[in-house]
Image (cartoon, rainbow, N blue to C red):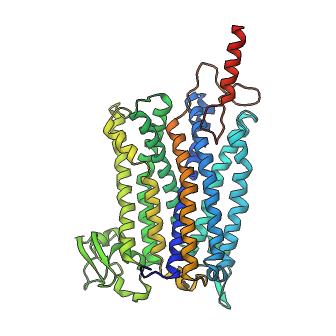
Amino acid sequence: MFGLEALDLARIQFAFTISFHILFPAITIGLASYLAVLEGLWLKTRNDTYRDLYHFWSKIFAVNFGMGVVSGLVMAYQFGTNWSRFSDFAGAVTGPLLTYEVLTAFFLEAGFLGVMLFGWNKVGRGLHFFSTVMVAIGTLISTFWILASNSWMQTPQGFEIVNGQVIPTDWLAIIFNPSFPYRLMHMATAAFVATAFFVGSSAAWHLLRGRDNPAIRTMLSMAMWMALIVAPIQAVIGDFHGLNTLKHQPAKIAAIEGHWENHGDEATPLILFGWPDMKEERTKFAVEIPYLGSLILTHSLDKQVPALKEFPPEDRPNSTIVFWSFRIMVGLGFLMIFTGLWSLWLRKRDSLYTSRPFLHLALWMGPSGLIAILAGWFTTEIGRQPWVVYGLMRTADASSNHSFMQMSITLIMFVVVYFALFGAGLGYMMRLVRKGPKISEGSETPDGGPGKKRTPARPLSAADDPAEGEHEDNTRLTKEI
């Protein structure tokens, strides 16, 4: 069907499930740190706005965290079911790395998550803040180990092959492989940027509907400060990451650039737009800027970038896909930088919260960070092809021996279940966002700690507590009697 084979369906299934999964950890990483900042600011200033925002976003964090855990479990099973040959070949490296992630990050998060979500009035302020910080650190440790495993597959180091299996010889070289620092910084920063625009979009939605209060304004202000500072930093990290990729995976860079051949000693142009044709081995309708490809990728005006025709056809990534996925990521990145700069200009004019054109842009930029993350992962993973472990094992040799019918049935089941389950979860999370933060009334505030008055912070409930309403009705009825 459509010229697809069982291997193609296995790749599509893995791409589908991991694309769903990566959205949740990205927001989890950003929100965990955001919650730690909010609670820290509340402890320092006693400004109720920060506490109200903490309770609001902790609910969304809890739902998002739960969906991330569930979707992540599927990924581990797929290594054994659909990619058993890969697990047999490289399991001695990837298995321990994923185990370290569970033993450190997941246990750390799980250990303190309950205190963070349910202990607001049951433990002291210091312990609760410590729990929030530990959960935030746990998400970053999780990112560390997952990216170490993925980066090793991109730039493998510290091993030897014995009887057709990878045997670790240097764990420090495995973990801190050449591409790991750049991928770790790039992904962690992307999570912070994506969360900033998610939070900013939520605030813009409320402001456009006339809900203007200190909590909503604080949401937008903090989000735009993050965008202004971190989005340009992400561009710089991306540049260093590109230089590293050129050194270790030149075929990927050639595919990203849609660059097929060099002519004499001419510098490499930058192809802004075009359509790379894998069969004709050329980029159609190319719009080029002379010298700029060399300048960006080699930081010189005369060095050339390796071309696709320098590699055998069977070793070339699919340029048609990565050419455009990369440009989607970069285009959204520039739009994020523009949004941050516009917010600074409006902030100086005291119109950040009232400029409807800007608020509409901030609203529509809500999913931009997540789309950019997906586009980036498509670029790096499809650009690694045809290798599952770069230069060592081809993707075609890594899959399990399943039939086309088996892969078709499981793929359909995954699509149906994922859209039903996670669609409901995302819908519920968006309902929480639309509800907005609950603003405390009166001067007496929920300070936290045993026996203190508080606003209930039930992470998985968007509705008001019916028991509270019943209590008020009963009190009123008693007074009337």
Vertical arrangement, residue 397 with respect to residue 383, above or below: below
Q: Is residue 122 visible?
A: yes
Vertical arrangement, residue 246 with respect to residue 352, above or below: below
Residue 464: x %, y % from top left: 62, 31
Vertical arrangement, residue 216 with respect to residue 288, above or below: above
Nearest the eye: 410 or 219 = 410
Q: Is residue 289 visible?
A: no
Residue 83: x %, y % from top left: 61, 78
Residue at 51% x, 54% y is 191
Vertical arrangement, residue 238 with respect to residue 134, above or below: below
Residue 2: x %, y % from top left: 42, 79
Q: Is residue 427 left or right of residue 479?
A: left
Q: Is residue 468 left or right of residue 417?
A: right
Residue at 71% x, 59% y is 104
Q: Quadrant of the C terminus?
A: top right
Nearest the eye: 113 or 10 = 10
Please give the count of numbered marks on the rendered protein: 0
Residue 256: x %, y % from top left: 37, 73
Q: Is residue 206 left or right of residue 259?
A: right
Residue at 35% x, 74% y is 320
Q: Quadrant of the N terminus?
A: bottom left
Quarter residue 313 falls in: bottom left
Residue at 56% x, 30% y is 438
Quarter residue 178 falls in: bottom right
